[in-house]
Amino acid sequence: MSERSDGGGRNPGQAGGQVTGQNPGRPGARRGGRDRGQVRLFDPTAPGRGGPTPQAVADAFDQARLTQARRLAGLTKKDLAERIGVTPAAVGQYETGATHPRPDLVPRLAETLGVPMAFFLPGRPHAKLDGSMAHFRSLRSTRVHQRVKAVAFVEQVWELTHALERRVRLPHVDLPGFSGGEVHSGVELPRDPAAAARELRRHWGLGTGPISHLVRHMEAHGIVVVLPPPDEDATTVDAFSTSQLPRPIVVLTANRFDDIHRYRFTAAHELGHLVLHGETAAGDVQQEREADTFAAEFLTPRDSILPDLPRRLDLRRLAELKHVWGVSVDSLLYRCREVGLLSDSAAGRAYQRLAALRDQPGFANEPITGYPGEHPVLLSHAFDLAASETALTLPALAAQLAWTLPRVRQLLGLPDHRPELRIVP
């Protein structure tokens, strides 16, 4: 991995995600047998329409948007109720649609949740994802409120993707077994994780050697990959993915190690979930093992890596191979044990020696920032193309989504170029 310098099938009728709103499918794309659209006539971004009044928002209030905004803010119904001066039961009624909030509460809701008032209006495509169909990398250590917030984050990622797809043709989804809103590849992968990894390599034309720029390959085949900003609470979740929306989405984080090699393995792990467990409810330990097996074979095919592995324990040699294959020394040690080059006891001693070398050159974690080729660019490049070809602006995109401008910048991964004011005492 030489980047440091520059740097089977789905059942279409069964869906864990639901898309409502205007024209949720990509024009001209096959829908894979799913009718995801439910057209609502109110368009808060129509030309000539001023900002909505609190009364107008209260009259047309979309309860699902309140739930989404509350989850994105990481608040419980009780938390929100206390901040706007109502009871938790009242918030519950707003979210079920039993009642609408009073007009005077609408500005308070918007301010508390950090969204424009127009956010609560219907008429925009909305991806409602069933959280049980999102695969979390560290499910046992991820709390329920973190998963709920992460799922709401993915819903927003899809909405941004859809808004850009109205102007730019993104790479079609070339992922065997996936048919949600895209042209199906017609290729079926084996159910065995290692065999599936080898077949996907063949299908994508990756050969049998090391894979550089793994995230780029995923994006080139239509998978939306997102690396949330450091201050986004989604980063408290190691990684997660879903194939239950019109495009498969993978959310990666720098993880607590901020190590490029763990990050790449996690990306391959989530890719394994997409191709192996697309229609399976998440949470099964066996699924996690299968995704790990897929990732190991996808990044380091057994027949290709075996001649490179030392016949006896040699941590320095493994540190060299780490940069060739783009996987951690830990992963290579596991591979040595898996192929029979190390006994369980020898591997245990090797891990102990490795722990003592963690801060040494060749063994220390390497920050993801040093490998720009592994950073997602699909959405930011789509916006750049839309801006140059269709004159799309960030404010216009924010208005279409009914988001704040900083939120759009965050999800596109664009820096804020405003000068920063500093007060010197």
Image: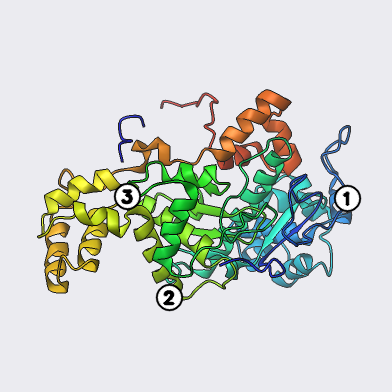
Residue 140 locus on image (x, y percent): 43, 72
Residue placed under numbered mark 1 in the picture:
55
Q: Is residue 256 left or right of residue 131?
A: left
Judged from the image, the secondary structure of the residue bearing numbered disc 1 is helix
Disc 3 + disc 2, Cβ < 8 Å: no
Residue 5: give x, y in percent of width and height: 30, 30
Q: Quadrant of the N terminus?
A: top left
Q: Residue flagged by tag 2: what amino acid is it?
A: Gln
Of mark 2 and mark 1, the one earlier in the sequence is 1
Tag 1: amino acid: Gln
Camera-nearest label, 2 or 1: 2
Q: Which residue is mark 3?
A: 261
Residue type, mark 3 in image: His
In whole angstroms, how far apart are the C-alphas of marks 3 and 2? Answer: 23 Å
Whichever of labels 3 and 2 marks the residue nearer the N terminus, that label is 3
> In front of the other: label 1 or label 3?
3
Residue 234 in view of the camera: yes
To which quarter of the image does residue 85 belong? bottom right
Q: Which residue is mark 2?
A: 286
Q: Above or below — where is 381 with respect to 376?
A: above
Name the residue nearer the viewer: 167 or 407: 167
Marks 2 and 1, how far apart in space? Answer: 51 Å
Q: Residue at coordinates 26% horizontally, 54% vertically from top-left?
A: 305
Percent x, y of residue 385 = 63, 29
Q: Are marks 2 and 1 in contact (CB under 8 Å)?
A: no
Tell me residue 28's x, y (percent): 77, 45
Query: Are the two marked residues, 1 and 3, in contact with CB atoms closer than 8 angstroms?
Result: no
Dividing the picture into quadrants, the one containing residue 63 is bottom right
